[in-house]
């Protein structure tokens, strides 16, 4: 079958569409006919030479997919069910969603709510799962109704979906971006205002900035996360899931011990089945209020993946890149 394969063997790196047979799964695995996939920052890391993320020399890329179950021995996952597939080692150490068929353990399968099509599921994808998990974590931490919430990296996958979700859930998202030309697009997604990367915090000469944010969703990491922590309101939290700027965090303890702020880590890989079900349920509730078409940066075939992955690496996306796999 035609798959997007990443290879790094004997010092030679290649990526592209080729005839390839993914590794067979175990009898307990579920087989899904893939209709759509999405392009994530993690996919770009996997499909890079000397990748620290990819754990095998040859594999089909794609850390998420959506389609229909064609074979299952699990009584809770029926053939013909529309599902999303993501998490675990999918597309990192085992063959992923850039293929017509994907074989995965049942724990990586999430039946889709009836309000979400397989196409919309990959506009959501791992990015949207992360965005919703971030909002739910902030709500659990005590985020108040109608609060103003900062979203960094707002034109990217997680960021743009977070802005749309916050608006749908009646919060006031403030979009931070290094792409000021996309301000109108972010307002259309629901941002109440748009700020630059350098406008997150003030008073750089002090250990703490002015208290600005009732909550924050950070998709960037590094120095940006440091400044968010300095500028959270008393008792507020930041849900952190990104490292596009840097995986390093150089900060101090003042925000934690004088303002009681919280740094909440968000994981979409090894989360429990209960968390997966809750996140997708909440997406189903909110889906009717989301403009999925407006969140699509582009729709591409498998052959368009090399260029799309480079676009992701350079941070030049506006929303989500959706891969049409079922037509290949």
Image: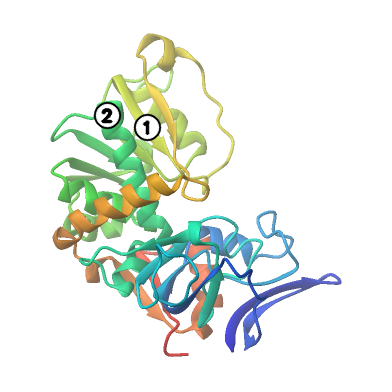
Q: Which residue is denoted by mark 2 in the rendering?
A: 213
Q: Residue at position x 23%, y 51% from top?
A: 165
Where, by quadrant of the figure, is residue 6 drawn? bottom right
Residue 197: horizontal and vertical position, in percent?
Answer: 37, 42
Q: Residue at position x 29%, y 38% from top?
A: 150
The CA distance from mark 2 to mark 1 is 9 Å
Query: Which label sits on residue 238?
Result: 1
Q: Is residue 39 left or right of residue 299?
A: right
Determine whether label 2 and label 1 are within 8 Å by CB.
yes
Q: Residue furthest right?
A: 10
Q: Secondary structure at mark 2?
A: strand
Q: Is residue 57 left or right of residue 31?
A: right
Q: Quadrant of the N terminus?
A: bottom right
User: Which colour scheme appears in the figure?
Assistant: rainbow
Q: Residue at position x 52%, y 45% from top?
A: 245
Foreground residue among 100 and 18:
100
Residue 287 is at least partly visible in this image: yes
Residue 127: horizontal and vertical position, in percent?
Answer: 40, 56
Residue 305: horizontal and vertical position, in percent?
Answer: 52, 77
Residue 157: horizontal and vertical position, in percent?
Answer: 38, 58
As drawn, 45 above or below 38: above
Q: Earlier in the sequence, mark 2 or mark 1?
A: 2
Q: Is residue 169 left or right of residue 110?
A: left
Residue 178 is at least partly visible in this image: no
As drawn, 282 above or below 324: above
Q: Secondary structure at mark 1?
A: strand
């Amino acid at each position: 079958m035609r798959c997007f394969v990443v290879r790094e063997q004997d010092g030679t790196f290649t990526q592209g569409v080729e005839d390839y047979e993914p590794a067979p799964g175990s009898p307990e695995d579920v087989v899904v006919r893939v209709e759509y996939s999405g392009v994530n920052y993690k996919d770009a890391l996997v499909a890079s030479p000397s990748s620290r993320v990819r754990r095998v020399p040859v594999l089909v890329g794609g850390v998420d997919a959506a389609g229909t179950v064609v074979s299952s021995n699990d009584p809770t996952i029926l053939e013909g069910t529309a599902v999303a597939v993501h998490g675990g080692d999918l597309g990192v150490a085992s063959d992923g969603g850039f293929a017509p068929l994907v074989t995965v353990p049942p724990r990586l399968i999430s039946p889709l709510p009836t309000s979400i099509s397989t196409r919309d599921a990959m506009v959501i994808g791992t990015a949207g799962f992360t965005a919703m998990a971030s909002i739910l974590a902030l709500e659990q931490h005590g985020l108040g109704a109608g609060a103003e919430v900062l979203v960094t990296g707002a034109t990217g996958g997680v960021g743009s979906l977070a802005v749309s979700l916050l608006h749908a859930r009646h919060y006031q998202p403030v979009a931070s971006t290094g792409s000021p030309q996309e301000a109108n697009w972010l307002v259309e997604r629901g941002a109440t205002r748009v700020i630059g990367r350098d406008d997150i915090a003030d008073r750089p000469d002090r250990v703490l900035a002015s208290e600005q944010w009732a909550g924050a969703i950070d998709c960037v990491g590094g120095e940006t996360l440091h400044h968010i922590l300095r500028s959270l309101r008393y008792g507020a939290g930041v849900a952190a899931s990104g490292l596009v700027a840097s995986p390093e965090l150089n900060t101090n303890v003042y925000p934690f011990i004088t303002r009681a702020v919280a740094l909440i880590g968000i994981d979409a890989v090894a989360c429990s089945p209960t968390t997966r079900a809750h996140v997708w349920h909440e997406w189903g509730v909110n889906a009717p209020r989301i403009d999925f078409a407006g969140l699509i940066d582009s729709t591409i075939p498998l052959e368009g993946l090399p260029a799309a992955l480079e676009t992701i690496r350079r941070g030049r996306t506006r929303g989500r890149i959706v891969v049409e796999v079922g037509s290949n």
